[in-house]
Each structure stands twice: as structure tokens, then as C-alpha cells.
Image (cartoon, rainbow, N blue to C red):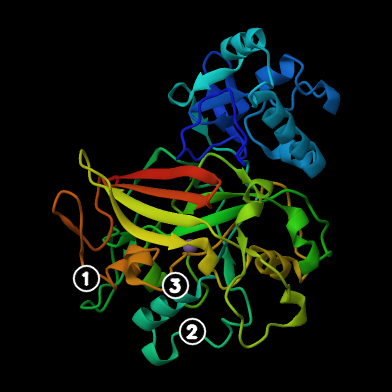
Amino acid sequence: MRLKSFIEVDENSDFPLENIPFGIGDIPGSGPRICTRIGDTVIDLNALSRMGYFDNLGRDEAIFESSTLNAFIAKGRPFTCRVRSIIMESFMVGGAAETEQVILREMALYHFEQVKMLMPLHIGDYTDFYSSIEHATNVGKMLRDPENALLPNWKHIPVGYHGRASSIIASGASVHRPQGQTKPADKTSPVFGPSAQLDFELETAFVIGKETSLGHPVPITSTDEYIFGMLLFNDLSARDIQSWEYVPLGPFLSKNFASVVSPWVVTIEALQPFRVQGPVQEPEVLPYLRIAGKNNYDLNLEVLIQPEGKQEIVVCQSNFKYMYWSMNQQLAHHTVNGCNIRVGDLYASGTISGPEPGSYGSMLELSWKGTQPIELSDGSKRTFIQDNDTVIIRGYCKNENLRIGFGEARVTILPAIS
Ligand code: MN
């Protein structure tokens, strides 16, 4: 049975009353405020707070008047869950009297097109994993050895690397094509110039909701307590720069020029109806990575490319449920050596490819290293992303009763700065 709001919510909306995600909206005349969204309506939580909606949670005037979610998330799960349930109760049919609804519409509600959504978090540290077995297998086949696509450590360790936090940007931004050093196969020495193999990586990311102190691992059975919510994540990658620079320490300038997040952090509570069992892990993992139960999420993901002035076209449909390593395992592994974590840290999944060619989560795989071009809506072909293309990632969970969505992470690629 779905909850019904007095705010209109389309059947296919990502934002029913059961979602109540959190983001930072640039409220007209006020500036950055913590917001949520129901249907097409953005709600200024600072305005709700001033109207007294959260008075029972203790006075903290400034908590919603913020340009990031960090301090709000750091108040802890009992607080953020209570805020969500107050919003659900208040915006249910019958939750507010007609006169109150008029005041709400005047003081706190905006059509989503009136509110520019901003970067939701201050990200202290960002890590990117490599946890899709289909992606790791495809890349291993293409770039190394088809017979031994997975390296010997892959099924024992959630492989990852520390990324760059400063260049993570909110959906809607434009990014100039990166320049860098590459070594074309037919040349004996490297050359410098704009990347010719700019790619997306279809990923999700989870946000840390509770800090640890240095030296204290998070046991795998406690990892859920530390995961506040999830975002969509596009880990833009320059494949030609990557293939020249990545040995022996992994990606560097091929990945750190920009990554794009969706603006709404969907809480882990909203995603609970969509928990599913992940793939069987064989061989069995070490005890510190063992966890029973449904630890993956049935989260539909798609990537679209829109050439300038043309229709967007779906180039990939995948699902988070395919992930070999769960977020719980990633977090247990990340902290097992005593590495501490902080509120707002971001942990990206790694490219999420599925088993079918249409579910591969990067152009590298979809065009099979540039050998099989994809045709777009305007008849043009792509092996990688071209200048003035817009790349859009969308994601939603759906069952018979409910759809909980993420909105989108969108970025336009501009020509390299010469
Ligand atoms: Mn990645």
C-alpha cells in the first residue's frame, strides 16, 4: 500500500512520499538550504524548521541552513530518520490542514525547475572500487589476457584505489575534455593532446554517515550502521591516458579531472524494500569479509547519450544487483587495517556492468575497445564520447507497489581548452 501525499506525485516519479531523499538546493532569495523532494516539488527544510515542524527534535536553528549535508548527517541516524518520518507524516493526505497547506506552498514549496540543485556533500575522501565481476572480466579480456581475465587477487579482495575528492561535481555541470600524455600504439614515444578516448563509468556511490577513529576497523556485521545513503556516480575516464599511465600504481590523471554525482542522496532506509541476494562468492572469502543475507540492491541503472540538440538515446541498461562485492564488504575491507572514515566520505562502486553486451557500463566495453561503434539517435556513431555530447545516468528501484528513484547525474563534455 503506497503512501499518498497532498502533493501530486506521478506514478513514475522517482520521488514518492516513501523516498524523502536529501540534497542542497539553491532556494530563490535564500541561498543553499537542505531540501527534499516529493514528486516535482522541492521542499525547503529550513523553512519547515522555522515553521516549527522539527521543534520536537531540539532547537538547532542552523542545521538546515547549510551548503552541505555533512553536519545534518553527522547528527546521526535517529535524528535523520525522525526528520524523514516527520516529513512523511506532514505531507500525507490529511497531514496538514488546508490553511496550513496554503502557508506551506507560500513558504517552503518550489517547483523543481525553480531550484538549482548543488553539490550535496563536502567530500573529504573518495575511494573507487572495481567490484563488478563482469566489468573486471571484460577489461581484463580487452587489455590483458582473455584466458586469465581476472587477476589472482580479484575474488579475494574488493580491489579499489584512493581517488580525488576536489573534482567531484554535481549533475548539470559541463566539463572540458582533458588533455594529457598518451602513447599511441604506432608511436615509439608519448604525445600530448586532448584525450581521444573519453569515457563514462556507470557507478553508484555510498555516503558515510558515521565516523570511526583511527585504528578501529568496522566489523562487517556493523557496516550497515555507517552507510547513510546512495548516489548515482559517473566516473569520467580518459582511456588513452589511463592505459599509458596506470602501471604500476593505477589510474591517476585519467580519472581525477572530474566525476559527477546526482544531487539527491537517497537514504539507505528508503532502499530497504529492494534488498536482494548478491552473486555466490566462490572461493569463499576470508572471515572478515563474510556476511549472510541480502546485501545487494535491485537498482535499475541506465546511461543515455544526447548529441548536441538531438534526442537522448539509451546506450546501457544495467543493475546494481550484479555487483560481486557488496557495499558492506567494501567498507569492512577499507577499514580492516585501521583506516578511519568520516561523515561525507564517498565510496564508489566501480563500473557496474551486467552479463549482456547492452548492460556494459562504459563505452570501452560497449564498443569493445573501439571496434564496435554504437549508433545514436541522429545516426552518428560513437566509440567514445565526443565534444558537446551530454551523458546522463538514471537509476531507480521498482517493485509492484513502489518506485524509489535517484533522478539523474548529467554532464556535458566541452572541447578541450587549447
Ligand atoms: Mn571507476
The residue under the point 57% across, 10% down is 106
Residue position marked by numbered label 1 in the rendering: 372
Q: Specify whether 338 is left or right of 227.
A: right
Disc 3 residue type (three-letter): His
Q: Identify the image quadrant of the N terminus.
A: top right
Q: Earlier in the sequence, mark 3 or mark 2?
A: 3
| Residue 394 drawn at (x, y percent) | 43, 48
Q: Circle 2 sits in a helix, a strand or a loop, which is it?
A: loop
Q: Amino acid at mark 2?
A: Leu
243, 314: nearer the viewer: 314
Mark 1 is on which residue type?
A: Gln
Q: What distance separates the C-alpha of mark 1 from that of mark 2?
A: 23 Å
Q: Which residue is mark 2?
A: 150
Percent coordinates x, y for residue 232 in the rendering: 51, 50
Q: Quadrant of residue 276?
A: bottom right
Given residues 314 and 338, the one toward you in this image is: 314
Mark 1 nearby-residue class (10 Å; few <14, some 14–19, many ≥20): some
Give the labeled residue for mark 3: 135
Tag of residue 98: none
Disc 2: CA contacts within 10 A as few (<14), some (14-19) or many (>=20): many
**Between disc 1 and disc 2, whose residue precedes?**
2
Question: In terms of secondary structure, where does tag 3 sit?
Answer: helix
Q: Is residue 341 left or right of residue 238?
A: right
Q: Is mark 1 within 8 Å of ligand 1?
A: no
Residue at screen point 77% across, 41% down: 74
- Local SS, label 1: loop
Residue lying at 51% horizontally and 64% vertically, measured from the top left: 350
